[in-house]
């Protein structure tokens, strides 16, 4: 199973870049993993919130394969514990999912078309985080879930 991490927005800021790279490298010991930061549409400031979300959705939908298992990070999604995320990953692997795509939306969230396409909607927290930190938290939690699956000591209970 491959893990693909998609995020709409600017490239990783320096203050989180090292952490994202470190956790991504750690994840790669368990699953092939890649990041794809999708630049916002040109002249994004000229669009309404609804138009911008629609344009972003079009970009993402073009990148997805039919068989990709899409996990949309959405504030209205299901919250998981770290152990729950580990079980989720194990289920995807057991079901022979080829690629799990985790999607972090743009500044205004995800368009309905992406939420409808999503196989699962996941909320990291009821708190609101900056997109850069969401990327870091996502990478760290995926690594933590992998370490739980292997019963390694990174995750202490």
Image (cartoon, grey):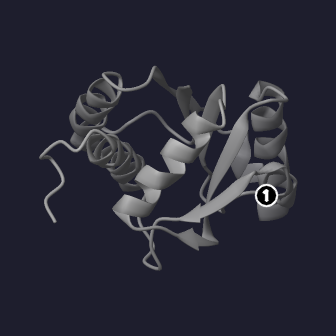
- Mark 1 lies on a secondary structure that is helix
Horizontal side, residue 120 vs residue 149: left or right: right
- Where residue 134 sits in the image (x, y, percent)? 42, 55
Residue, far bottom:
126
Residue 77 visible, this orientation: yes
The residue at 34%/40% (across/down) is 146
In this rendered view, identify the residue nearer to me: 111 or 24: 24
Q: Dot 1: within a 10 Å radius of its alpha carbon, few (fewer than 14), some, or many (20 or more) residues? A: some
- Where residue 35 sits in the image (x, y, percent)? 49, 28
The residue at 87%/53% (across/down) is 113
Which residue was labeled with disc 1? 115
In this rendered view, identify the residue nearer to me: 89 or 115: 89
The residue at 73%/32% (across/down) is 68
Screen quadrant of the N terminus: top right
**Image vertical order of residue 64 relative to residue 109, above or below:** above
Residue 131 visible, this orientation: no
**Image vertical order of residue 126 relative to residue 81, above or below:** below
In this rendered view, identify the residue nearer to me: 38 or 96: 96
């Amino acid at each position: 199973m491959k893990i693909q991490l998609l995020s709409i927005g600017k490239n990783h800021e320096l203050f989180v870049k090292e952490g994202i790279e470190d956790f991504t490298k750690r994840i790669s010991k368990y699953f092939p993993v890649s990041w794809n930061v999708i630049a916002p549409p040109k002249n994004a400031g000229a669009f309404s919130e609804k138009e911008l979300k629609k344009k972003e959705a079009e970009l993402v939908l073009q990148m997805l394969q039919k068989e990709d298992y899409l996990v949309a990070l959405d504030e209205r999604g299901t919250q998981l514990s770290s152990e729950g995320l580990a079980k989720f990953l194990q289920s995807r692997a057991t079901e022979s999912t080829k690629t799990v795509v985790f999607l972090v939306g743009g500044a205004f969230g995800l368009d309905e078309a992406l939420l409808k396409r999503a196989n699962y909607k996941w909320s990291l927290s009821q708190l609101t985080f900056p997109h850069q930190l969401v990327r870091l938290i996502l990478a760290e939690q995926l690594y933590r879930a992998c370490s739980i699956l292997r019963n390694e000591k990174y995750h202490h209970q």
